[in-house]
Image (cartoon, helix red, strand yellow):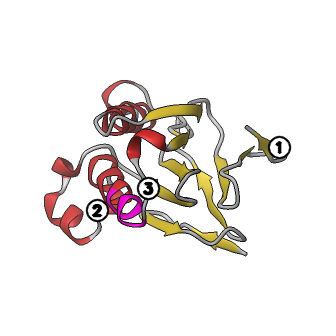
């Protein structure tokens, strides 16, 4: 069963038959986490680096932003029995699909905010598929935490 994570969304599950999948990550990012001991995993698809850009919108949808989205993801996975220091964390996205550079490079800003937020929980990123100029899709198996990345124009590759 595939559980689709939309833009500015997250899903957490314990069903070993499930796959969490986020499609077409451009400058936005997917954060997949899996705790093998608890058998729980989650996937977040956020669009912007900092909830301070629009606190009102962040209050309505914390998954839109790296800081509040990762906080929400960690909270939900922890409530389901996961422990941040045991989690395998994979991130994907942060691409420069529209040629942005400098301060307006949302992909780079998302990547930096994502790394900072994950580190604040004592979790480590085990794999990154970030940057470049192409969209990606990420898929997380809840049976065992395996992850596949598909870059636009390519095939899924297990990481």
Q: Which mark is residue 62?
A: 2
Which quadrant of the figure contains the N terminus? bottom right
1 or 2: mark nearer the eye = 2
Q: Which mark is residue 82?
A: 3
Is residue 77 magenta-colored? Answer: yes
Say what secondary structure mark 3 lies in: loop
Residue underneath mark 1:
154
> Compared to 113, does 30 lie above or below?
below
The residue depicted at 32 percent of the width and 43 percent of the height is 49
Q: Which of the pair 127/6 is nearer the observer?
A: 127
User: Which residues fall within the magenta stretch?
Assistant: 75-80
| Residue 35 picture location, percent across and down | 53, 51
Mark 1 touching mark 2, by CB under 8 A?
no
| Residue 6 picture location, percent across and down | 52, 67
- Marks 1/2: CA distance? 31 Å
Say what secondary structure mark 1 lies in: loop
């Amino acid at each position: 069963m595939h559980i689709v994570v939309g833009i500015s969304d997250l899903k957490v599950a314990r069903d070993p038959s499930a796959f969490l999948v986020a499609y077409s990550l451009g400058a936005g990012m997917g954060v997949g986490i899996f705790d093998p001991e608890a058998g729980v995993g989650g996937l977040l698809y956020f669009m912007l680096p900092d909830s301070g850009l629009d606190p009102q919108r962040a209050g309505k949808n914390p998954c839109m932003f790296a800081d509040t989205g990762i906080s929400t993801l960690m909270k939900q996975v922890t409530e389901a029995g996961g422990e941040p220091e045991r989690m395998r964390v994979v991130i994907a996205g942060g691409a420069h699909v529209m040629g942005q550079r400098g301060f307006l490079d949302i992909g780079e800003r998302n990547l930096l905010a994502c790394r900072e937020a994950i580190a604040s929980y004592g979790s480590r990123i085990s794999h990154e598929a970030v940057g470049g100029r192409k969209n990606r899709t990420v898929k997380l198996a809840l049976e065992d935490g395996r992850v596949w990345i598909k870059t636009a124009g390519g095939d899924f590759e297990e990481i």
